[in-house]
Image (spheres, rainbow, N blue to C red):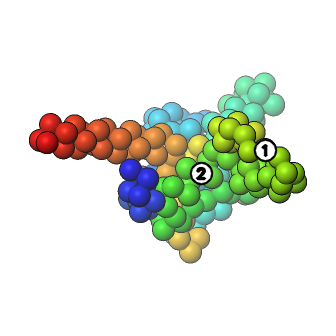
Amino acid sequence: MLRTIQTLSVRDLMNDTPLLLQPSMGLHRALGLLLDHQVIAAPVVSEGNILVGFVSEQDILRELWANDFDFDIERCIGDIMRDDIVSVTPQDTIDSLAAYMVFDPNKLFEEKTKAPERIPGNFSDDLARAQVCRPKLYPVVDNGIVLGTIDRHQLLKALHHLAKRSRMEQSFESHNE
């Protein structure tokens, strides 16, 4: 199954009709769209779907909390969007995206380089120490243009489907032997 995952690209799994928000959109409308589309975040784009920011439910909740939950404030998405955007390309592999989502390779291998005499331990323990908290949803961008989004749920759903298919194939092969 690993070989299959290493050949799948983000383009193969991405949502190619994502919710896109505009900087001028009000908080109430943007939150309504996130909820209606059942997504936790969305890219913010200018004309031509050029990526200019990113906003999540958490960003909106933080802004609402800071303003006593007043939806009538004159703030818009452009005022609260993040511009330090983590995006992926359509050519990125699912394997590399999954790795990025769960661990920092510098942390994973820093212990090995700092103490090369260290007795190798359990890889699961090393991986747990290297885990990171990264976004759940990523804009898929090519030359600054948003082509889609991909999120952790889509990735896990695809992995689950591949594992199920692999089990069925193995079962079929063992049954025919």
Depth order, front residue of 95/134 = 95
Q: Quadrant of the C terminus?
A: top left
Q: Is 161 in front, or is 172?
A: 172
Q: Are marks 1 and 2 in contact (CB under 8 Å)?
A: no
Task: Name the kind of residue labelled 2 in the image.
Answer: Ala
Q: Nearer the viewer, mark 1 or mark 2?
A: 1
Q: Residues within 10 Å of mark 1 (few under 14, many from 20)?
A: few
- Residue 129 lies, in percent from the top left, at 75, 39
Query: Would you say 138 lies left or right of 76 here?
Result: left
Q: Amino acid at mark 1?
A: Ile
In the figure, residue 7 lies in which quadrant? Answer: bottom left
Q: Which residue is mark 1?
A: 119
Residue 145 placement (x, y as % from top left): 54, 69
Q: Is residue 149 left or right of residue 72?
A: left
On the question of residue 77 being in view, the answer is: no
Total number of numbered discs in the rendering: 2
Answer yes or no: is residue 35 visible.
Answer: yes
Q: Which residue is mark 2?
A: 99
Q: Position of residue 106 (x, y in %)?
A: 77, 55
Please tell me which residue is depicted at 63% across the width and 44% down the height of the picture: 102
| Placement of 72 over or under 78, stated as above or below | above
Q: Residue at x 74, y 57 (%)?
A: 84
Nearer-N-terminus badge (1/2): 2
Secondary structure of the residue carrying numbered label 1: loop
Instruction: Looking at the picture, tell me which residue is in the foreground, 102 or 51.
Output: 102
| 77 left or right of 172 in image | right
The single residue placed furthest to the left in the displayed view is 176
Residue 64 vs 12, above or below: the answer is above
The residues bearing labels 1 and 2 have C-alpha atoms spaced at a distance of 24 Å
